[in-house]
Amino acid sequence: MSKKVIFIVDDSATMTMSVKSNLQMHGFEVHTAGDGAQALAKLKGGFKPDLIITDINMPNMGGLELIKNVKALPGFRFVPILTLTTESDSSKRDEGKRLGATGWLVKPISGADLLKVVKQVLPGA
Amino acid sequence: MQIQSKPFVSVLGATSFVAAAALLVFISPWLHEDFFPYLGVGPSWDYALVMLTSVGIMAVMSRVVKAMFSLAKFDTEWPTASRHMPRQQVADEVREVAPYLEVMTQQLDGAVKETEVGVMALMEAMNAIHHVSDLQMQRIQDSDTSGSALTSALEEKVMVDKQLAMILQMFVDKQRADAELNILRIQRLREVKSLTPLVDVISNVARQTNFLAINAAVEAAHAGDTGRGFAVLAAEIRQLSSRTAEAAINISEKIKAATEGIDDEMRNATEVDDRNSASGSMQRVIRDIDEMQERFSAVSGSLLGVIEGVKTGHHEIIMQLSEAMGKIQFQDVIRQRVEQVQGAMNELNDHLQNMADQLVDKPWDPTTMVHLRERLEQQVSNYVMKSQLETHQTVTGKSADSGQDRPSIELF
């Protein structure tokens, strides 16, 4: 069975490495991008992950805008997108939900909790 | 408030004296004509008390005048002993806040970068631990595979050996049974040999009967015609004894033929039986094979236990490393909080520079000035974390609207 592919988008190098290492330990293939603009360019270039995990507050393009753009791409309507952010503003969370996010995770998140959520949104993981 | 300049003190002293003198003139008649006589104070004491009272009034008046001067916002420069920092100097000092804050901002930047470097190194080390554990796991799985193959092969061989041993045992048992039957047969044949003396007896009887028949024939011949019948009978008896003797010789020969070599055969059969009983060692071989298999199973079981233990340990390592990776996310939280503080420090610097400008260079327009208190409140809109709002609320004593508590993990 091929590995599930997860795409992490975050401007924090430590955050990216932490989540990537955690998921790789559990058998996932992980790709990363440093902001929304980089991520969108990669997706438009043909890369199609099974799951996207994105921060909200990032330079160049934030997470909410990324979600909106990704959902508009052909073939990405049903790709699950989780946010992983320190953002506590309820209005932004509601907007994320409205734009099509699958879930909202607040940093810091434990390794076990992250894995549990990923397996929940990725059938067969 | 201590005012040290001489001209000022002179003016103050003169003013106090005048005020005191006026007061004394005003209340003097009442003092001399009513108050002192009422107290029973004589003329000499009268004047002394007036002097003392004058000094006291002067001291009080000087204090009152001092207070009035301080309230009047006295801002004239006194080159020799000014009590306030000059405006230009204040403005210069405030402008020095900019590089001071810049240094502190860079210090915070450096601190955040150091935590980032440290955390990255820590994660590299944790990944290395995971890699080593993975390699160990791989080696254990290879051993497990080889061990399982070896166990299967050995079990198969043991089964084949046991079957072979059982077949051999059956053969040996059959051989033994045949040997026993053989011995039995030989023993029966030996008993036939014991008939030989009986045959001798028969031969003797036949010989003696023959002698008797001969004697009978002789007597019959002596008897003449009356003994003719007896002579015939004697002749018959002689024939009978002759046939009996022949039969006895025949039987004896046949017994001899049958039992010839029987002793050798018996010896051989006994030796074969001994050999068969000696290889009840086949039973021992089967037992040894069983014991070997049991020991091997025990060792295999023990090795499987070790392998399972390593697998469990590997899984536990992954879980613990995974948890540690989650805890390391504190660094990103710290970074964001520090960045917000750096932004606030920059804003404070802008505010102070603006104040310095308005102190000496630019006209002060209170309508356009944003007070620091307002800037502090505006910081609330820059917060992203609940903890930042809570800190603000704790320090300012104001309730910051943190909104409804939402779960940290929410799937839509």
Image: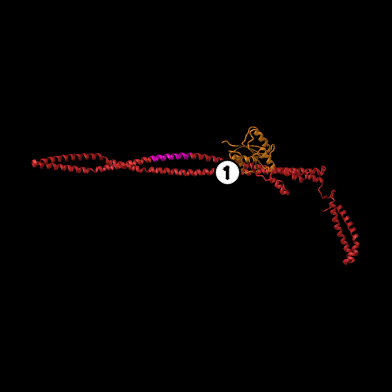
Chain colours: A orange, B red
Host chain of mark 1 = B
Instruction: Identify the residue position indicated by label 1 in the image.
Output: B317
Residue B164 forms part of the magenta stretch? yes
Residue B256 forms part of the magenta stretch? no
- Quarter of the image where one finds residue B329: top right
Q: Residue at x 41, y 40 (%)?
A: B163
**Whole-percent x and y of residue B59?**
85, 58
Q: Residue at x 86, y 52 (%)?
A: B8
**Whole-percent x and y of residue B94?**
78, 45
Is residue A118 found left or right of B84 in the rendered image? Answer: left
**Whole-percent x and y of residue B368?**
80, 42
**Whole-percent x and y of residue B18?**
89, 56
- Local crowd size for mark 1, using a 10 Å CA cut-off: few (<14), some (14–19), many (≥20): some
- The magenta segment is B149-167
Q: Secondary structure at mark 1?
A: helix
Q: In the image, is residue B350 above or below residue A72?
A: below
Q: Number of labelled discs?
A: 1
Is residue B194 found left or right of B287 in the rendered image? Answer: left
Answer whether residue B67 is visible to the viewer in this image. Answer: yes
**Nearest the camera: B332 or A48?**
A48
- Screen quadrant of the C terminus of chain B: top right
